[in-house]
Structures are given as C-alpha cells and as structure tokens.
Image (cartoon, rainbow, N blue to C red):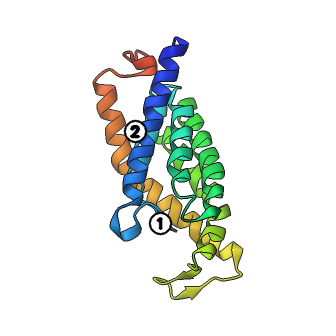
Amino acid sequence: MRRSRYVAQAGLIAAVYAVLTVLVLQMPFYLGWGIVQFRLSEALTVLAALTPSAIPGLALGTAAANATQLSANPIAIYDVLLGSIATLVGAAWTWRFRRNAAVALLGPILSNALIVPIYLPLMLAGLGLYEVPFLGVDLEGHWLGMYLIGFAGVAFGETVVVYGLGWPLLSAMRRLGIGAAGQADTK
C-alpha cells in the first residue's frame, strides 16, 4: 500500500473511531466508561482484520477520544496512554490473526480486559466510585479485587460489542470484497 493511502486510511479510521467514542461518552447511562463499557466504536476494531492502517488509526482514535476527558478528570491521562496501548496491541493481534475472525477478534477483548483494569481503579477512585452497587461491595483499598471486577466487566462489554456488532460488520465488509489494502481479500 502506498504511504499516502495508508496515512489517509489511518486518519479516517482514527477520526471515525474518536467521533463514535465521544458520542457514546455523551450518552446517558454511562455506556462508554466505568467497569462495564459498551463503546460502540469498539466494533470498528475489526477493521484491523482488513487493513494494517487500522492499527495506528484505532490507537490514535482512542487517544484522541480519551483526551477529550482530560479537562473533567486529569487522571484520564492513564486512559489516553494505556488505553491507546491496549488498542494498539489488540489491533496488532487482529491483523496478525485476520484469517480466523473468531481468534482475531479476541485481540481487542483481551488487551483491553488485561490493561484497562490496571488503571481503572485509579480513575474510579478519583471519581469516588469504588463501590460496586450491583454487588453491594465497597472495594476501596482493594486493588486486586477492583482489577478482577474490572477485567470481567471490560471483557464482558468488549465481547458484546466486538462479537455482537463488529463480527457482523467484518462479515459484511468481507462479503463486499473489502480486504487488505481495500482490495478483494483473495487469500
């Protein structure tokens, strides 16, 4: 793929991902943040199965979207940095295993479920949200417990979005003949 096309695709993916994320973050019911997140933009992580330009595009889109939260919560810098790394790792996994959609789509789920809960307790504590109301548990001072609940919550939300919305999107794009470099995927 020529460099200009690669950069243009990465930029477009970053912009669409960031806009969708910011829109979800503005929705009621806190769909886009917290222990269980349903960021609809995560369905776009499947684009990494179609083009390598999605790898930097998704990571930059994550950084841009998460940076919009910095003025409200300076601790969100963790989300900007580590969330982008999680997306980068997940997208690289997806590209690497692109021939097997079931395995490829595990990348964003696992990377986010493993990385986001590392800093999620810090962000939630900064907002005073160490209590898990649906479990009736207060985890203040219990990082491991918060990490494990965060792992389960992030994995659940990612799985719903990536497999529930992303896989059908990937299947539709492949049926249209969209593959690596925007061309028919003949492999």
Secondary structure of residue under mark 1: loop
Question: Residue drawn 32% across and 20% down?
Answer: 177
Image coordinates of residue 9 in percent, x first then y, are: 45, 25
142 sits left or right of 177 in the view: right
Please provide percent x and percent y for residue 30: 41, 67
**Is 55 situated above or below 125?**
above
Q: Is residue 131 above or below residue 104?
A: below
Residue at image coords 57%, 32%: 56
Q: In this view of the protein, which residue sits in the foreground, 96 or 51?
A: 51
Q: Specify few, some or many for label 1: CA neighbours under 10 Å numbering under 14, 14-19, or 20 or more.
A: some
Give the residue at mark 1. 36
> Residue 120's spot in the image, x, y percent?
61, 65
In the figure, 176 relative to 85: above or below? above
- In this rendering, position of residue 160 left or right of residue 51: left
Is the residue 58 above or below the residue 153 in the image? Answer: above
Q: Amino acid at mark 2?
A: Val
Q: How many marks?
A: 2
Instruction: Name the foreground residue: 186 vs 49.
Output: 49
Which kind of residue does numbered mark 1 sit on?
Answer: Val
Q: What distance separates the C-alpha of mark 2 from that of mark 1?
A: 22 Å
**Quadrant where the C terminus is found in the figure:** top left
State the residue at coordinates (43%, 42%). 17
Label 2: which residue?
16
Disc 2, SS: helix
**Where is residue 34 shown, x and y percent of the image?**
50, 67
Quarter of the image for residue 93 reads top right
Earlier-in-chain disc, 2 versus 1: 2
Label disc, if present, on residue 23 of the rendered structure: none
